[in-house]
Amino acid sequence: MSDRPPAKEPYRFGLSFQSSPLMVRHALSEVMSRLQKKGVREKDCGVFELALAEVLNNIVEHAYEGSDTGSITLSITIWNNSLNCEISDIGKAMPDLSLPVPKQKELNVGLERLPEGGWGWMMIRELSDSITYQRTSGRNKLAFQMGLDQA
């Protein structure tokens, strides 16, 4: 049972910003500030921030290929002990119009032999309770949901 009383109404907010690493940092700061003001626990904020940062940085790097001329729209809802996030952009579509399926990595190797890339989608999938992607009318729409700690 959560020591936080259930909200009578969902709390929603949204942001729109340009596709640059600096604007992603500003957006993450704004999101974390709002979540903390709404009483979301530090642990939940940290996990959510990690997943959200990975998604947003992937959009900047891959969907917009590093161009800061694209826009990203973010909508977050806190409701029924969960954080729900919807992100949209008009950058390049995901390969095969689907979420990447992370490949298993060999972890029984020395630190110097661990692969450098390819951890992001594995991490996003592990941290979220559900994740969806669709491409509609030239727009990427990704949504993920994470349960809040009910200590």
Image (cartoon, helix red, strand yellow):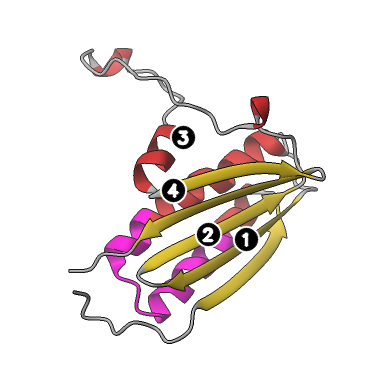
In percent of width and height, residue 104 lies at: 35, 19
Residue that carries the numbered disc 4 in the rendered image = 130
**How far separated are the C-alphas under marks 1 and 3?**
19 Å
Q: Where in the figure is residue 41, as x and y percent of width and height?
A: 29, 70
**Of callouts 4 and 2, which one flags the residue occurring earlier in the amino acid sequence?**
2
Q: Are marks 4 and 2 in contact (CB under 8 Å)?
A: no
Which residue does the image show at 26% across and 64% down from the upper left? 149
Q: Is residue 44 magenta?
A: yes
Give the label, 1 or 4, closer to the camera.
4
CA separation in Å, label 1 and label 2: 7 Å
User: Label 4 near label 1: C-beta < 8 Å?
Assistant: no
The Cα–Cα distance between marks 3 and 4, rounded to whole angstroms, is 13 Å
Identify residue type, mark 1.
Leu
Taking the spot 25% from the left edge, 19% from the top edge, the residue there is 107
Q: Residues within 10 Å of mark 3 (few under 14, many from 20)?
A: some
> In this orientation, does residue 66 appear?
no
**Residue drawn where x is 49% and y is 78% of the image:** 10
Pick the front one: 6 or 45: 6
Residue 58 versus residue 3 in the image, above or below? above
Residue 97 visible in the shown view: yes
Q: Which residue is mark 2?
A: 85
- Quadrant containing the C terminus in the rendered view: bottom left
SS category of the residue bearing label 4: strand
* Front position among marks 4 and 2: 4
| Residue at mark 1 | 74
- In this rendering, the answer to whether 116 lies above or below 6 is above
Q: Residue at label 3?
A: 121
The question of residue 53 being in magenta is answered with no
Which amino acid is tagged 2?
Cys
The earlier-in-sequence mark between 2 and 3 is 2
SS for tag 3? helix
